[in-house]
Image: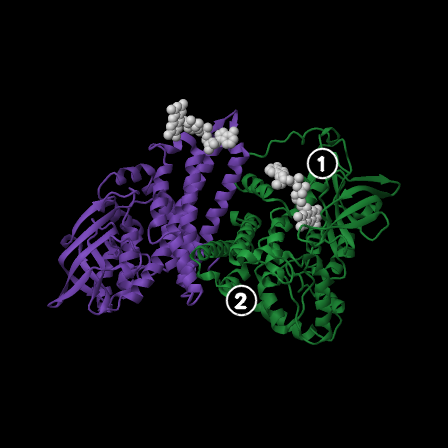
Amino acid sequence: MSEAMGSEAGVRAEVRAWLAENWDPALGLVEWRTRLAHSGWGMPTWPTRWYGREMPEAMVPVIEEEFDQAGAIGVARIGIRTLAAATILAHGTDLQKEKYLLRILTGEDTWCQLFSEPGSGSDVAGAVTRAEFQGNQWVVNGQKVWTTSAHKAHWGLLLARTNWDAPKHRGLSYFIIDMKQPGVSVSPLRQMNGFASFNQVFLTDAIVPPEMIVSTEGDGWTVTNTTLMHERRGADGLRAQPKGSDRPERIYGEERDEIAVALEPYRWYPSRAGRVDLVLPRAIETGAIHDPVVRQEVGKLLVMARCAEFTARRARAAKEQGKPQGPEGSLGKLAASVVARAAARVHTQITGAGALLAGPEAAAGGTVAEILLSVPAVSIAGGTDEIQRNIIAERVLGMPREPSEDTKKPFRDVPRNTVG
Amino acid sequence: MKFSFSAEQEAFRESLRGYLAERSPTKEVRRLMETEAGWEREGWARMNAEMGLAAVRIPEAYGGQGFGFSEQCIMLEEMGRVLLCAPFFASAVLAAGAILQAGTEAQKAALLPGIASGDVVGTLAWVEDSGRWDAEGTTLSAVRDGAGWRLDGHKSFVIDGHTADLIVVLGRTAAGLSLFTVDGAAVSRRAVQGIDPTRKLARLAFAGVPAALLGEDGGAAGPFGRVMTEAAVCLANEMVGGAERLREDALAYAKMRMQFGKVIAGFQSMKHKQADMLMEVELAKSAAYYAAAALDEGDADGAVAASIAKAAASEAYLQTAIHAVQIHGGIGFTWDNETHLWFKRAKASEVMLGDATLHRERMMQAMVEGA
Ligand SMILES: Cc1cc2nc3c(=O)[nH]c(=O)nc-3n(C[C@H](O)[C@H](O)[C@H](O)COP(=O)(O)OP(=O)(O)OC[C@H]3O[C@@H](n4cnc5c(N)ncnc54)[C@H](O)[C@@H]3O)c2cc1C
Ligand SMILES: Cc1cc2nc3c(=O)[nH]c(=O)nc-3n(C[C@H](O)[C@H](O)[C@H](O)COP(=O)(O)OP(=O)(O)OC[C@H]3O[C@@H](n4cnc5c(N)ncnc54)[C@H](O)[C@@H]3O)c2cc1C
């Protein structure tokens, strides 16, 4: 215990000294973040060679506290780029790390995830987007769908089929694709809640240079799983959307702008999580709190939400202490989805007839309606609830895997949707 | 330590789990549940000699080991796992808790060492036939009689009330709510048939039973409230231990039972049920652990955390028990199968100290002033 305390105090002193020397609100945002990335304090758990300091997870909150104290801005964190960074760090070549990691940390580049297709969503490995090596480059043809933020993205994480004779999971490869090229066409899809944060992406003779395959040809499924694991872990409901600081110096303004652009596709994400934070204040404000039935429903929701939060914190504490992940670590996404659905139901009860309305004149300036129409996404995006349950049953509880008729034969012989 | 256990605590849990697995196999649970007492002096004495169970949380000054509330909750979780038939909850949680919270220095010094050694078994009698879990329902009256007091009235649903040596009783005096200690043998008492045969209940009748005031005349409301908060957290921890055991047993059964040419664990509806069970049990565990640490650390919102833990455990344990019977199919409905033992504890514990509805209401009252 005392040793750990010692090193914590040591790290605290070190980061404080570094900030005292280096943090300067007069710098430009990218200039500051470049300096921060090179120091390793921006991503302290990363390898020393790549913008990190190889520190244990437990030091992250300590370091973040010191940044808050100093009012210092951290590296960019919003969006798919964090998944891109984790994936490239795990499987990328030095060249890829050099080209992409720094610009992810500075917030200059935005990314998207090109996994789902019209014919394959839950069954990600059923992708039929085709990548062929022609001459000295990969040529990609196919269609992706539900691609969040594709309209903003500079780069895409692309899953494509490179071998049709191999079994399903072994014929895939993983690429980094330049989204700003003529072969990539993005068209927005309007969602049931009226927003349009996801897109269709048409790939027509789109080009990927040979050095932009991640890992080896045929190893795309392994790499995809790294991305998906990070996505699931991040869905535990603990992370709040960053707001930025309203201090006057220019760098804070630049950060606010960066956040506003990066967050644009995610504006409604708090609503899809059910806005549990609004439930009690609204129950009090509307007087619904005095209805014993509503009180019970609010109580049920709050108990569940607190339990989910405690569980996510247990998972995080285990990670920080370097313990192997226990069952609590796999439940966050499913629990968040159950909580969100319950919250939508309680918001309806609290709002009563007012739940008939939408738009600025409606309850909480339209937020209640937005919640009711956004929550259905939470149990689909990033892997449906059913798929989460399969994963928990198979990987945590060791139950038999789903029977599949499609994993042994060549993919070309596998029955599939006729779309596109 | 709200979200993790120390290495010492993990080691404590592990050694206790091994010990209790040996001391309290289901065969032993079945043997003791068929007795009227529900537990045996000899076995209780042996467990206290070997593991000092009853002493763990009692301060060293009163003959205990002076560990924290969290350690006590770890013990309860492990006891709940094996359905230990012993007067631990009645004596070490309820009676010791009441004496610690309400007793004078001299009373603690006089009463706690016996409880800590296990030689004296205590319990707390507060609920009456009305079934109210709070102090408001108290009608038992106490009047002065020379240096002592006399009690008239009744108490119901008293855990181990027919076997306890020392009974702490909640009553009313002219000054208000007060706690008393009485000699168990001086009370007219009988065991009642409970839905859960592994934890016995009694009804006590008091007709001028001599009693000693515990703490201050009219001063019991505060201490009693704290005892109830602690008891709810203790019970929640015991419950999540039982729920986890049920979940694991049902999983093991599903992996072994074959129907339609394969193990039933391979059917997706079974897999999804098991995933939901894991989630419900883990969420309730998190709340039970959090509440234990919150009380240990003296948090201001300890009572809210306690109600969250009890509400979550009440629903998760019973739901797990329902699923567990279902997963076992016809055999799950038999007396020979073990599942019903935990099902009955789940049902009784759901009700004991207030069900989920009551605790949600308590939480709401604490969170929303005046609402
Ligand atoms: C808001 C939002 C944002 C998204 N962003 C992205 C993104 O940025 N990039 C990206 O690649 N994708 C994205 N997606 C797509 C998302 O990952 C898929 O929608 C999801 O994985 C489900 O796939 P699907 O839509 O094809 O449904 P299907 O896979 O066709 O599923 C239909 C139904 O069948 C069930 N089902 C399927 N297989 C099984 C099984 N084995 N067992 C039991 N039930 C099963 C599903 O649970 C579901 O209920 C996004 C989706 C949403 C809603
Ligand atoms: C009170 C009572 C009275 C009864 N009376 C009679 C009687 O008079 N005559 C008689 O012949 N029988 C009788 N039965 C037996 C009853 O029909 C069986 O218990 C029942 O059909 C389940 O079979 P099982 O017990 O073998 O469980 P199993 O078939 O082993 O089932 C165990 C679990 O696996 C699940 N499961 C099994 N197969 C699948 C699948 N394909 N997909 C998803 N889940 C699956 C089940 O739903 C269950 O949850 C009685 C049972 C009870 C409880």
For image coordinates 40% across by 30% down, the residue present is B330
Chain under numbered label 2: A
Mark 1 vs mark 2: tell me if same chain: yes
Q: Position of residue B14 (x, y in %)?
A: 41, 48
Q: Position of residue A175 (x, y in %)?
A: 77, 46
Whether pointer 1 and pointer 2 mark residues with C-beta atoms closer than 8 Å, the reply is no
Q: Is residue A327 left or right of residue A27?
A: left
Q: What is the number of the mark on residue A6?
A: 2
Q: State whether residue B162 is above or below residue A3.
A: above
Rendering quadrant holding ligand 1: top right
Q: Is residue A321 visible?
A: no
Give the distance between the C-alpha atoms of the residues marked 1 and 2, in whole angstroms.
48 Å
Q: Colour of chain B?
A: purple
Specify the amino acid type for callout 2. Answer: Gly
Q: What is the number of the mark on residue A170?
A: 1
Q: Colour of chain A?
A: green
Q: Position of residue B53 (x, y in %)?
A: 31, 52
Q: State whether residue B144 is above or below residue B318.
A: below
For image coordinates 66% across by 73% down, the residue present is A246
Q: Is residue B232 visible?
A: yes
For image coordinates 67% across by 68% down, the residue present is A73
Locate the C terminus of chain A by quadrant: top right
For image coordinates 21% across by 50% down, the residue present is B203
Q: Position of residue B139 (x, y in %)?
A: 22, 60
Chain under numbered label 1: A
Image quadrant of residue B19? top left
